[in-house]
Amino acid sequence: MIRLVIARNPFDLTTRQETLVPFVEGKTLNQYFTEPGEWVYSINGELVDDTASPTDEAYVVVLPKLEKQAFAILLSIGLSIATAGIASGAIFGITSVLGRTLAAMAIGMIGNAIISKIAAPKTDSSNTEQSATYGWQGAQTVIGQGHPLAITYGKCKSAGMLISRHVTSDGEKQYLNLLYCAGEGPISAITDVKLNGNPIGNYKEVQLDVRLGTNNQEIIPNFNDNYADQPLTYELTNDWSIHQTQGNLSTALEVTISLPNGLYYSNDQGGLSETSVTIEGGYRKVGSAEWIPLPISNNGGQSAMLEKTDNRWFKRNSHSRTSIDNSQYTGVIKDSSNKAIYRVFRFDVKEPGQYEVRMRCAHKDGNSNRHVNKCTGHS
């Protein structure tokens, strides 16, 4: 059955007519309701045209079509009757002539202001200076939530919408990953990509991955997860540095340790000798008193990417189900380089929650001027 509600007077919904109509597969609204005139239809609260076919047990509402100006005229008529009634004393029962006159004037002014707002014509805001594409300043990247997605017609220049940003580190290098949305797909092509006005091909070690918005497209690399980067930079000492993650649905923790000046010992021959630092870390759920140690890998790369299963740590994305060798996860970083060093450590804790992470530099081989071993933590 279909519940059909007909409100011939939308200003008095108490007069609406409700009936249960047998459902017929494929039958359209203009076949369920055949009265002449212009009508507005909705199915389960969604506006549709009269050729739509409701499903079984749908809630269909039919209203007469009212233009905005017609609506304002009806309100004006009602307002005129109300102010006349006040002025004559029929409404509110005011006996003073001055009081009735002032009340009628006040109601008329307020009512006219409301009607003007309701009946005001729409302002054309399609070409403003704040437009991300057509403003005087040219194409500008849109950043933030709540912006509409562009629909591309023909060929046009777009700065896109930045929807994700993440920094990854690998040894001596850091990589900035940016994910832009060019609008609704699918589209035929994205060409002539530029960075700061220069063709992207003029830059070395820049990777461009393009997807045209099809249903079977592959995932863009480095964006399999949703990151909540927090731009923190503080020097690690022997004391614990504690930081709290954002949100309460985190399932993984990623920490970057950097040695911005390198890691080395200046030997007597004027060269660089190997030296080391020891990093320790731990985590706990917000509200818990117990800190759980984090196994800090002595090496970078995939060895530093771990996941926790049944209270044991395994290498992430490894086919082997043998837990890690704890002797290789003592947090010792060794090197003899005067270039900046970055180490990324990821821990998939699996259980969603809000976490606190603590890090410290538990040991340095030396603190003399010859030892270059300043450590900073990032999250």
Image (tube, helix red, strand yellow):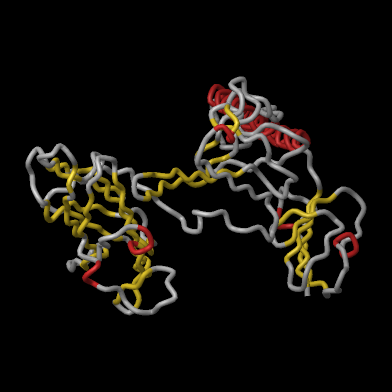
What x and y, as percent, mark residue 55?
A: 77, 70
Q: Would residue 272 appear left or right of 128 to someone viewing this image?
A: left
Residue occupying the far front of the picture:
269
- 379 to 151, vertically: above or below: below
Residue 314, placed above or below residue 217? below
Is residue 147 or residue 55 the one in the foreground? 147
Seen at 34% across and 64% down, the residue is: 303
Q: Is residue 47 above or below residue 149?
A: below
Q: Quadrant of residue 302?
A: bottom left
* Front-lying residue, 8 or 31: 31
Q: Position of residue 338 (x, y in %)?
A: 24, 40
Q: How many marks?
A: 0
- Name the residue rendered at 24%, 65% in the picture: 294
Report which quarter residue 98 is drawn in: top right
Q: Is residue 379 left or right of residue 192?
A: left
Q: Which residue appears farthest toward the top when viewing the image?
A: 136
